[in-house]
Amino acid sequence: MIESRANERVKEARKLLLRKERKASGLHLIESDKLVREAIASGARVVSCFVEQGHAFPPPDGAPVYTVTRAVLESLCESQTPQGVVAVVQTPPSEPPERYPAGLVVVLDGVQDPGNVGAILRSADAFGAVGALLSPACADPYAPKTLRAAMGSTYHLPVWQGELPPQLAAMKLQGFTAICGDLRGSATLPALAASVALVIGSEGSGVSDETAALCERFRLPMRGHAESLNASVAAGVLLYVVSEAMPR
């Protein structure tokens, strides 16, 4: 039983609430019974678990499990209502592949809100994307808020991080159609290859000019009076439209 927030194991785990510590250690924290189970089922390496006293949770193979008080568990969480379990998990490799898998890849260009990034990863998972590529300016996909918004989808598909123009150029050489959501684009969806890179721009400025120049520009028809959609909502609609239009 760990009863003190000053316990060394707790202090080391709590550091992972900071992005720089996650990057330096190659580890991240996940909260809640559901997310920890999703990580385990996906094959992610769980380094350690902190389980609230009285909460029933099957221990993952090979990982130490520490029973903690409610106060200690709360100190490891950003959410106001922790759900029994926190785990330290090894972060998967994020380097882009030499060759991308065929299919639909969602590409995020400077999406900075963790909730939006997580929601887009969840939608990408739902619509059958084979991976997600994030620019360096995006929110950390392994931040606690991002992971909660993704609802486990972070562990269902590879998440890569890299500079977008060279990666999109490489994808196009591999036969991908690159398409971006752009209010200046055509309302007619272009012909799509069997593999598509769908680019979603940042909340404030959209897709960068350098990235958009590599893409077919497409805009969703807006029949009401709103000027634009939230990034995660637009991404969800675009993922549906594009996934339905792709050759099968």
Image (cartoon, grey):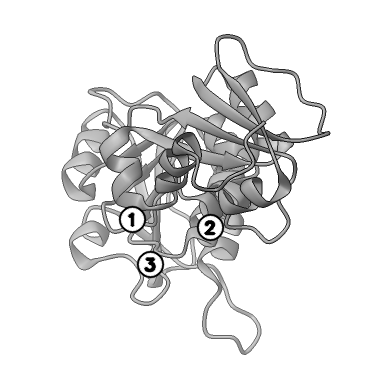
Q: Nearer the viewer, mark 3 or mark 2?
A: 3
Residue under numbered circle 2? 235
Where residue 222 sits, quadrant-wise, is bottom right
Seen in the picture, residue 210 relative to 74 is either above or below; the reply is below
Residue visible at 26% across and 28% down?
174
Dividing the image into 4 quarters, which one contains the C terminus?
A: top right
Q: Position of residue 246 (x, y in %)?
A: 53, 38
Q: Secondary structure at mark 2?
A: helix
Horizontally, is 199 left or right of 84 in the view?
Answer: left
Residue sitting at 40 percent across and 31 percent down?
91
Q: Which one is closest to the eye, mark 2 or mark 1? A: 2
Q: Which residue is mark 1?
A: 216
Q: How crowded is the residue under tag 1: few (<14 C-alpha within 10 Å), some, or many (20+)?
A: many
In three-dimensional space, the C-alpha distance between marks 2 and 1, rounded to whole angstroms, equals: 16 Å
Q: Earlier in the sequence, mark 1 or mark 3?
A: 3
Residue 148 versus residue 56: which sits nearer the camera?
Answer: 56
Mark 1 and mark 3: Cα distance apart in space: 17 Å
**Residue behind mark 3:** 202
Question: Residue at left 68%, top 27%?
Answer: 37
What amino acid type is highlighted by mark number 3?
Ser
Relative side of 93 to 82, left or right:
left
Q: How far across and down, in percent of the image, does residue 185 sit?
A: 38, 69
The Cα atoms of the two marked residues, 3 and 2, are separated by 11 Å
> In terms of sequence position, does the residue under pointer 2 or pointer 1 come before the other?
1
**Residue 31: which quarter of the image?**
top right
Count of residue discs: 3
